[in-house]
Image: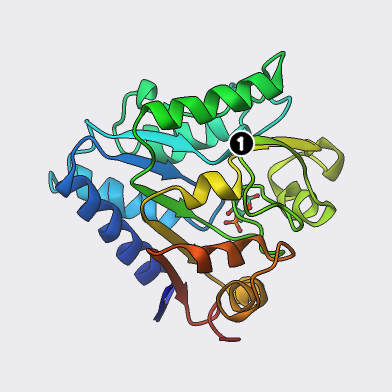
Amino acid sequence: MEVVLLPDAAAVGRLAAARVAAVVRRRPSAVLGLATGSSPEGIYAELARLVAAGELDLSGVRCFALDEYVGLPAQHPQSYASVLRRSVVEPLRLDPAQVRVPDGCAADLEAAAAEYERAIAAAGGVDLQILGIGANGHVGFNEPTSSFASRTRIKTLAPRTRADNARFFAGPDEVPTHCLTQGLGTILDARELVLVAQGEAKADAVAAAVEGPLSSMCPASALQLHPRASVLVDEAAGVRL
Ligand code: GLP
C-alpha cells in the first residue's frame, strides 16, 4: 500500500485527479469507479478543470458508482444518482448514460445487485476505483463486519453513518436505513484503488486502515490486500499515522 501525506485537501484532490487522468490518457475507454461524499469533491473539481482546459477527454470513459440509498428515487436531491449528476456528470461534461448507479428503488433489490455485478464485469472491470472512508472505516457503504469477500448487496446503514449523513437531509429520521453497495470483494477487483481522506475526523479510521490489523471491523483495512492501492491524505487525516 502506498501512503502519501500531503499538505492540504487541495493537494489531495490534485494528486488523486492526476492518477485518474493518467489512467484515462493511457486508456480513453477506461472504466472508473466513483465515490460520493465530500472526500472526492476535490478530485472531481480538478478533473472538471482539466476537461474545461482541454487537457483531458472523458468522453470515452464508463463509470460505476459504489453505492446508492434504498428507497430514494433517482430524482431525489440526495440520491447518489443526483449527487453524481451534480458533482460528476455535469461538471465533467459526461453523457448521463456513461454513469451507472445501483438501482436502490428496484422492486427486486437482490436481482438489481446481481445485475450491477454483471454490468461491471461486462464492462471489463474497473480500472481505477476512487474511495472515500467513513469515520468508522467504511468504504462504499461496507460497514464494520462486512466480509472482505462481499459482493454488491443490500446493507443496513450503521447508526453512526446515518448520523454523519443526516446533514444532507431535513432531519436524522429522513436518512434511509438501507443501501445497495458494491462489496469489499467487488472493490478489491478494481485494478487500482485510490482512497482519499481529509480532516482529523478521519484520522483514526485512516490509521486503522493503514496500520491496523486486517479486520472486518475496519472495512478499509481490506485495501492492505490490494497490490495497487494508494491512500492520499492531508496532514490532519494523517496525524495518527
Ligand atoms: C458516505 C459514502 C462513502 C463515503 C463516506 C465518507 O456515506 N457512502 O462512499 O466515502 O461515507 O463520506 P465523506 O467523504 O462525506 O466524509
In the rendered view, how is the structure colored? rainbow
The amino acid beneath tag 1 is Thr
- The residue depicted at 73 percent of the width and 40 percent of the height is 169
| Residue 141, above or below 15 | above
Kindly tell me whether residue 15 is visible in this rendering: yes
Locate residue 75 relative to residue 20 in the image: left or right.
right
Q: In this view of the protein, which residue sits in the foreground, 148 or 231? A: 148
Locate residue 32 relative to residue 219 in the image: left or right.
left
Total labels drawn: 1
Q: In this view of the protein, which residue sits in the foreground, 14 or 124? A: 124
Q: Position of residue 58 (x, y in %)?
A: 23, 37
Locate residue 12 relative to residue 103 in the image: left or right.
left
Kindly tell me whether residue 36 is visible in this rendering: no
- Disc 1 under 8 Å from ligand 1? The reply is no
Helix, strand or loop at label 1? It is: loop
Q: In this view of the protein, which residue sits in the foreground, 87 or 99? A: 99
Q: Position of residue 152 (x, y in %)?
A: 61, 36
- Figure quadrant of the N terminus: bottom left
| Residue 158, above or below 233 | above
Q: Residue furthest top?
A: 107
- The residue depicted at 27 percent of the width and 34 percent of the height is 61
- The residue depicted at 49 percent of the width and 52 percent of the height is 188
Q: Residue furthest bottom?
A: 240
Q: Position of residue 54 (x, y in %)?
A: 12, 44
| Residue 60, above or below 235 | above
- Figure quadrant of the C terminus: bottom right
**What residue would you read off at disc 1?**
152
- The residue depicted at 78 percent of the width and 39 percent of the height is 175
Q: Residues within 10 Å of mark 1 (few under 14, many from 20)?
A: many
